[in-house]
Image: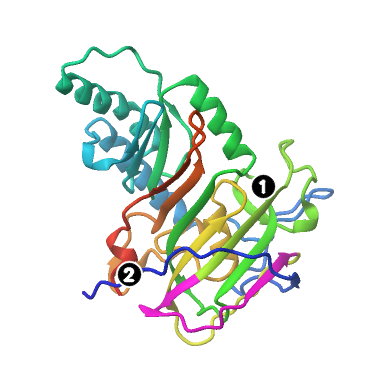
Amino acid sequence: MPVCSLPSIPSISPPSTTVFRSPFMAAHHHYDSLDNYPVPLSPPLPLISKDIELNRAMSASSKSSLFSLSRSDVLHEDEWLIALNKPQGVYCETILSSVQSLVNDCVCGSGTQSKKTEFHLANRLDRDTSGVILVTKSHKAAAKLVKAFTYHKVKKTYIASCVGQAPKWKKMTIKSGHGRSKFGAWRVYAAKDVGRTLPGGSSVRDMETLFEVLSINGDQSNQESSEIDIVVEEKSSVELVGNKVAVLVRAYPRSGRTHQIRLHCQYLGIPVKGDVKYEGVYEWNGRVYDGHQLHAESLSFEHPVTGSSIVINAPLPSWATQG
């Protein structure tokens, strides 16, 4: 297959604001709701997702005891940090438990004595999301990076391969609410519901993502480069016109909510391939997907100890480079 390079990450200027109002995809007519609680605007989990997700979880767990990292997985390392390229289908906890052996092997090979290091995950990725994962080697670095992530001082980019309605936009910022519904699933809520209490006692939090279309069916997007800004207030009704298309997007999350990119892709009518939990195709063009196609492309942040600017990029998986 021909290999194409992705456009470089551009600088982003704030857009003007419009409001997106519409009811959700025609296939969904009923949503769980409780009196006095905010109503989720994205649909409940599809029934097909339960068994598929269970099988994926069992497969990942069975592989965890055999998993090990190699030096080729290391993207950056210094006295306080180590960044790794996490593969798809591996839990973050598996990565963390493998780091000690990786570092010890390296130290032993150098002939120097090592002191006990306490490793901490600075960020987390879903089981089937690949890409940059950051591990700290000291409490000082861990505390500062937790604060940096909490206050959105770390810039992140992701690449997602999606299938759905061809977007009519080149860049879009979507702002919504985010929270757990009555049965514990993560859902999209109206932006106006941010701060309201949900079943279980948690509250709706803000969620914001900028998306950029990179290609449609393998061809680079030629849409106008103008950016639109939507504020979610009602259920989405992105209706399929014609055939579904393959859409490659770059996402810039401006908040750090659980399943954020996956939820926003679903709401926009371009769910991530293989993401059966959020209506992504399980099979496409004769291929069955073992997991969703989402990749943590880069992290940019100020080093927690030295203060220097750090940019870490993970090599792109084959599905993100082949047209």
Q: CA distance from mark 1 to mark 2?
A: 36 Å
Which residue is located at x 67 percent, y 47 percent?
179
Residue receiving disc 2: 5
Which residue is located at x 20 percent, y 15 percent?
112
Viewer-closest of 107 and 60: 107
* Res. 31 visible in picture: no
Position of 141 relative to 269 (above/below): above
Which residue is located at x 46 percent, y 56 percent?
158
Residue 172 is drawn in which quadrant? bottom right
Query: Mark 2 falls on what kind of element?
Result: loop
Most prominent secondary structure in the magenta stretch?
A: strand
Position of 209 relative to 53 (above/below): below
Query: Mark 1 falls on what kind of element?
Result: strand
* Res. 26 visible in picture: yes
Specify the quadrant that holds the C terminus.
bottom left
Q: Are marks 1 and 2 in contact (CB under 8 Å)?
A: no
Which residue is located at x 74 percent, y 36 percent?
201
The percent position of residue 108, horizontal first and vertical second, equals: 18, 19
The percent position of residue 134, horizontal first and vertical second, equals: 42, 37
**The stretch drawn in magenta includes residue 137:** no
In this rendering, position of residue 175 left or right of residue 145: right
Viewer-closest of 143 and 89: 143
Residue receiving disc 1: 179
Q: Nearer the viewer, mark 1 or mark 2?
A: 2
Mark 1 or 2, nearer chain start: 2
Q: Residues within 10 Å of mark 2 (few under 14, many from 20)?
A: few
The percent position of residue 255, horizontal first and vertical second, equals: 62, 49
Specify the quadrant that holds the N terminus.
bottom left
Q: Which residues are magenta?
A: 213-232
In this rendering, position of residue 120 left or right of residue 36: left
| Kind of residue at badge 2 | Ser
| Kind of residue at badge 1 | Gly
